[in-house]
Amino acid sequence: MITGFPNDFLWGAATAANQVEGGYNEGGKGLSSFDVVPYYEPEIRKNLKVLTTDVTEEDFRKNKTGGAEGNFPKRRGSDFYHQYKEDIQLFGELGLNVYRLSISWARIFPDGLSDEPNKEGLEFYKNVFSECRKYGMEPLVTMSHYEMPVDIVDQLNGWESKETIHHFVRYANVILNEYKNDVTYWIIFNELNMTVFSPYTGAGILQERIVSENIETAKYKAIHHQFLAAAKVTSIARTINPKFKIGCMIARLENYAATCRPEDQFTALQDDQLNCFFLDVSVRGKYPGYMTRYFAEHDIEFEITEEEKRLLASNTSDFISFSFYNTYVAKYDDTGTRVSGNLVDSEPNPYLKTTEWNWPIDPLGFRITLNRLYDKYQVPLFVAENGLGANDILEESGYVHDTYRIDYLREHVAAMKEAVKDGVEIFGYTVWTAIDLVSCGTNEMSKRYGFIYVDADNYGNGSYKRFKKDSFSWYQKVIKSNGEIL
Ligand code: BGP
């Protein structure tokens, strides 16, 4: 029997460019889609017409001029753009052997549409990778983590247009070539399934601008375009460096049927199919039969050509990566109260405690997910995100006592270890996040996930100095002992 983590297990932590970098208009960078999404006070948030991660047509137009009034935390991030050397040094001290980060498309192609890449942007990431190497850290790069140049939104309505494939493939081609000796592991799209729940976040779609028959068609068309782009990029990557490992990613929405009532069980099955659809296409290389029915029943119509089918079939992913934060409850006649989750909510599970942001905590659900995904797809798994968002307090002494985060991570790492013993092939784990950054869902700085505290608030006040939290030394020991000391 396997007794623990393999010796070459990749222990790490993650960030995303749009949430951590800042320097939104420096180094030749163009505005990206999240730079125009403002921070809404919690009271306003309750009555918003759009999700906090989406933006209205009117706000988009106003904010994309760059000089918009208001508070845009993602333009500041955690100031990684200026402090990356010190930050990576801290990641080295933490002992990470993998650092998952994303490249900002708008830093490489400021307007997304022109042919010439921005040299300063390319150089920035080159420097980041060389800092990583200095500390023996493998960079794992997400090519597109919820952002794109605003002009791609403006001119093409993001991924709704097929033309976006061309612009993305050009961008991917440049970074694959540029960093062919610096990076081995690539994830093409962050949480591809999120386009269904938040079309602006996942695909740069402004709902008022869709040209498709209906929003459902626009979303699935955009997803199809992303599948095609991923297949093209995978095929190019294999010619550039055969050692590249190319992965797909979903936000895993593991769910339990609310009861043993067959209707609840069937709802759970269907919800799971809608989540696994993204892996079916990316790993098995073809659209599953249940989606043909789903499309017909939801008036979703778009063309998939024979040539496209061949492209998908011959360029599947080397590994599956996913984020896991919580589990969901599936109920046939679902009308009750809600708990939140990663951009999706559901009925509460009475057996689970929740976080301050009302996300259920379920380490055993994590073990279930690892087993289920591996049983089904039989390809190596990489846990790209797992962590706890909390309102950490920086004490005057400079300490942050985040025991709740240590508890959350300890239980999840223990569950992952059990899954390894169950025979699941997992090659790495990146905690969300290495360092505090701006929340994706709420644009808050105060929803913190990091091992390192950043002294900044929701309005950009603060010194932006870094402080190690208690979880920093805890994770250091976990890595050093290869998951033996929890
Ligand atoms: C995932 C995203 C991340 C991240 C995380 C936590 O969906 O890939 O970018 O932020 O969720 O979500 P939040 O920041 O909303 O708490």
Image: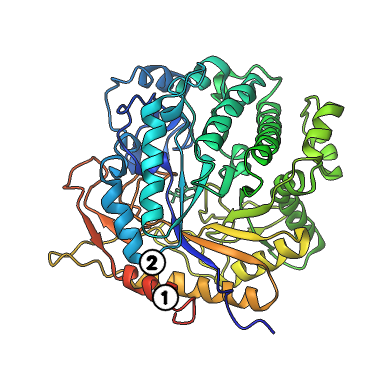
Q: Image check: 400 left or right of 58?
A: left
Q: CA distance from mark 2 to mark 1?
A: 7 Å
Residue 351 visible to an observer of this rendering: no
Residue 364 visible to an observer of this rendering: yes
Q: Which of pointers 2 and 1 lies earlier in the amino acid sequence? A: 2
Q: Would you identify the image quadrant in which residue 172 lies?
A: top right
- Residue 242: give x, y in percent of width and height: 66, 46
Q: Would you identify the image quadrant in which residue 73 lies?
A: top left
Q: Amino acid at mark 2?
A: Gly
- Residue 464: give x, y in percent of width and height: 21, 48
Q: Report the quarter where the C terminus lies.
A: bottom left
Does residue 485 sit above or below 47 in this rendering?
below
- Residue 270: give x, y in percent of width and height: 76, 51
Q: Give the residue at x 30% y 28%.
A: 26
Q: Amino acid at mark 1?
A: Lys
Q: Report the quarter where the N terminus lies.
A: bottom right
* Residue 480, numbered label: 1
CB under 8 Å between callouts 2 and 1? yes
Find numbered disc 1 in the image and state the secondary structure of the residue it sits on: helix
Q: Image check: 202 left or right of 434?
A: right
* Residue 95, numbered label: 2
